Image: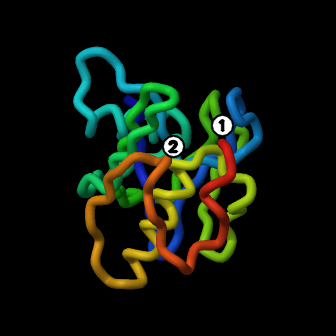
Amino acid sequence: MVLGTIPIWGEQVLLCRRAIEPRLGMWTLPAGFMEVGESTAHGAMRETMEEAGARVALGPLFSVLDVPHVDQVHLFYLATLRDLDFAAGPESLEVRLFHEHEIPWSSIAFRTIVATLRFYFHDRRQGLMSLHTGDIREIQLPHESHTQLDQPR
């Protein structure tokens, strides 16, 4: 299971540029594999600290996306940054805050990250956050999205 957060500061989200393969140099939300003995919430906060050096207040579960072709489930929580004291960890080249229009959509590392971000910004515009679930191969995304999801990643 891959666990992560959508770290939020006002109208911006924190993204990490990957320092490791796969997808070296591409942008992602802070996330990584669950460790033995930890809860999903603890794992998501741990990964956010490890990859982005960011302390967050964890919010509700936001997306649970099945990725059957690699036998994974990707789970993301909403999270509020506690402060602006963040920095790239060993698995990140850089971390920075993005407004929606600044996100480098063509350089997002994984389909689940594209989907989670698109759902987040759509929900924020609608004023109502909801849990998003499904198989990444079949999921329907909001029309106002900025990039195609059907590109292989």
Coloration mode: rainbow
| Residue 51, quarter of the rendered image | top right
Disc on res. 53:
none
Label 1 secondary element: strand
The reply to whether residue 30 is visible in this rendering is yes
Name the residue at 72% across, 39% down: 93
Residue located farthest toward the front when viewing the structure as drawn: 138
> Along the horizontal axis of the image, is 81 left or right of 117?
left
> Along the horizontal axis of the image, is 131 left or right of 2?
left
Q: Is residue 34 above or below residue 18?
A: above
> Along the horizontal axis of the image, is 104 left or right of 15?
right
Residue located farthest toward the bottom when viewing the structure as drawn: 126
Name the residue at 42% across, 42% down: 4
On the image, the x and y values in percent for residue 106 come to: 74, 58
Q: Quadrant of the N terminus?
A: top left
For the image, the number of numbered tags is: 2
Estimate the spatial distance between the alpha carbons at disc 2 and disc 1, rounded to whole Å: 9 Å
| Residue 74, quarter of the rendered image | top left
| Residue 122, quarter of the rendered image | bottom left
Q: Is residue 92 above or below residue 38?
A: below
Disc on res. 92:
1
Residue located farthest toward the top when viewing the structure as drawn: 36
Q: Residues within 10 Å of mark 1 (few under 14, many from 20)?
A: many
Front in this rendered view, residue 117 or 15:
117
Q: Is residue 124 above or below residue 70?
A: below
On the image, the x and y values in percent for residue 85 come to: 52, 52
Identify residue type, mark 1.
Answer: Ser
Residue holding disc 2: 30
Label 2 close to label 1 by CB (< 8 Å): yes
